[in-house]
Image (tube, rainbow, N blue to C red):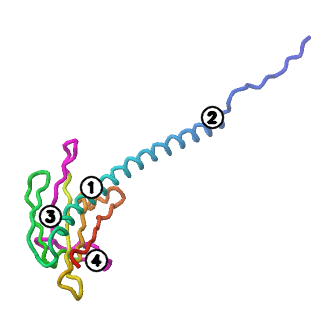
Amino acid sequence: MKKRRKHRSAGFTMIELLVASFVLIAGILGGVVMILVGVSRNNANRVDTTSTNAAQTVLEQIASTSADTNPTLTLTDCQSNSLSITTAPGGAPLTSTGDIDFTAAVTSGYQMNYSMCGSNGLITVYDIRWNIAAVQGSTLGKLVTVSARQPFVATQHGFAGLAPVTLRTVVGL
């Protein structure tokens, strides 16, 4: 008479299957989170770059004038809106760090809602504010601070609360 051996089943146990499933799910979720973060950062970088371009446009307009004059300039955005730029000393209030204070009330003549049109028909409006200060001890120099932010991003705290872009230059001297 032959002896029969008991064979163990060579498959996975339930615990091994659960651990493998957990590892697989954690890996997939981690990948999905990384994709979402990447898409969000890509959009944040686009908004940040466009804010810089909008601020640069206003800064260049102001810097193109002579420091000893204070003309009111006109800028036209992509929607054919004529926007005024006051170049006299004064402007939007500054924070203690010298940046434009977007929590303060708008100063008339030193703020505009500038529209930028995308290639896909998307129109994005940027809140641009500026401050012009006479350089101490000189009537021939101005410190120009221009800042731009995308209001939706600022009010919704989207894209990790993207800070406004601030540019500075000295005109004259």
Q: Residue furthest right?
A: 1
**Residue 131 percent across, percent down from the top left:** 20, 74
Res 1 → quadrant: top right
The numbered mark at residue 95 is 4
Q: CA distance from mark 1 to mark 3?
A: 15 Å
Q: Are marks 1 and 4 in contact (CB under 8 Å)?
A: no
Q: Which residue is mark 2?
A: 17
Q: Are marks 2 and 3 in contact (CB under 8 Å)?
A: no
Q: CA distance from mark 4 to mark 2?
A: 58 Å
Q: Could you say which is closer to the camera, residue 124 or residue 6? A: 124
Total marks in image: 4
Q: Which residue is mark 3?
A: 112
**Residue 150 percent across, percent down from the top left:** 24, 59
Bounds of the magenta segment? 94-123
The earlier-in-sequence mark between 2 and 3 is: 2
Q: Nearer the viewer, mark 4 or mark 2?
A: 4
| Local secondary structure at mark 4 | loop
The earlier-in-sequence mark between 4 and 2 is: 2
Q: Is residue 25 left or right of residue 76?
A: right
Residue drawn at point x = 13 percent, y = 79 percent:
68
Q: Are marks 2 and 1 in contact (CB under 8 Å)?
A: no
Q: CA distance from mark 3 to mark 4?
A: 19 Å
The amino acid on which the numbered mark 1 sits, given as a three-letter code, is Thr
Q: Could you say which is closer to the camera, residue 168 or residue 151? A: 168
The amino acid on which the numbered mark 3 sits, given as a three-letter code, is Met
The numbered mark at residue 50 is 1
Q: CA distance from mark 2 to mark 1?
A: 50 Å
Q: Compared with residue 144, is residue 2 higher up or lower down, i.e. above or below?
A: above
